[in-house]
Image: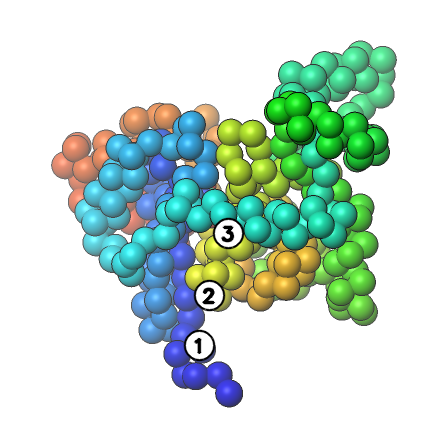
Amino acid sequence: MDSPLSKQAVFRFAPSPNGLLHLGHAYSAILNRNMAAACDGRLLLRIEDIDTVRCRPEYEDAIYRDLHWLGIDWERPVRRQSDHFPFYQHALEDLIGRGLAYPAFLSRGEVRERVAASEASGRPWPRDPDGAPCYPIEQRDLDPALARQWIEDGRQHAWRLNMDAAIAAAEARLGDHPLQWQETGAGPEGETGQVMAQPQRWGDVILSRPDAPSSYHLSVSLDDAAQHVTHVVRGQDLFHATSVHRLLQVLLGLPQPVYRHHGLVLGEDGRKLSKSNRDTGIAAYREKGLLPADLCLLLARDGLVLD
Ligand code: GLU
């Protein structure tokens, strides 16, 4: 029987320390805190620092400082993804062993060249929901002996999910159940309720790269399960990524949380805020003498409610 504790809702705020938190992060963090408080749930903080090139300790310190100023408290110890690379590696090896992942040797530049050549001859190249070109799928069929040789020779490579094989494997596990998730917020087109996952739109997503032994998709799916997260509350920019997370959850036998994707704070140019713009950073508001309550007013002005 489940213990009463296992029924407690678990929320998490999971920023990447690759820049300063902005007003949009403040919204996400406050919303997670409020939702956790409303149901007597727990609030976790996870530092998503798998990108060891772009993530920096001073940005991690800034996260703690900004959250503290906002009056948000979180459970200790904080999970830092860079402390768990062997955990992600283990799952990757599982997927490789099941024939669901393959080594990908093309550099970004080489992919770009192929895209340009294809588009120049009038053949559109498939793009993922973020607009990035999908990886060429014929690379799945590289001769395995040659791929092994290249790896032994030390050739740089990433690992990618064979999306068609992965979807087939997930369907075999799901039987008659569709691959979907429960959305209590909304996607960019107002998608809500039971949403059908469409992982095929992403093509062969990356699972690990030469400079980072895990990818966002793999580590976020594994960590939400490892931390018993029941409610994922995050920006609408990650709505489509949920399709990949649901797929990985099924493939790796992980539980599925409930999702709430919330609206984004947009800059004056109508685009989502950037971490590199200091003016919209939480720290900039603090230095201007604003109070956390003023940030809530700014969010309300943008139509972002904090229930
Ligand atoms: N680390 C991601 C970011 O900073 C958020 C991941 C998530 O909430 O799933 O954009």
Q: Residue at x 39, y 46 (%)?
A: 83
From this view, report whether residue 277 is shown above or below residue 194: above
Is the CB–ligand 1 distance for label 1 below 8 Å?
Answer: no
Expressed as whole percent of the image width and height from the top left, the position of residue 217 reads: 57, 45
| Mark 2 neighbour class, 10 Å CA radius: few under 14, some 14 to 19, many 20 or more | some
Is the CB–ligand 1 distance for label 3 below 8 Å?
Answer: no
Which residue does the numbered mark 3 point to in the structure image? 87
- The amino acid sitting under disc 1 is Ser
Expressed as whole percent of the image width and height from the top left, the position of residue 121 reads: 85, 13
| Mark 1 neighbour class, 10 Å CA radius: few under 14, some 14 to 19, many 20 or more | few
N-terminal-most mark, 1 or 2: 1
Q: From the viewer's perspective, is 22 left or right of 139?
A: left
| Mark 3 neighbour class, 10 Å CA radius: few under 14, some 14 to 19, many 20 or more | some
Expressed as whole percent of the image width and height from the top left, the position of residue 61 reads: 24, 39
Labels 1 and 3 touching (C-beta < 8 A): no
Q: Residue at x 80, y 46 (%)?
A: 164
Gap in Å between the C-alphas at discs 1 and 3? 23 Å
Labels 1 and 2 touching (C-beta < 8 A): yes
Which residue does the numbered mark 1 point to in the structure image? 6
Which residue does the numbered mark 2 point to in the structure image? 228
Numbered disc in front, either 3 or 2: 3
Q: From the viewer's perspective, is 232 left or right of 293?
A: right
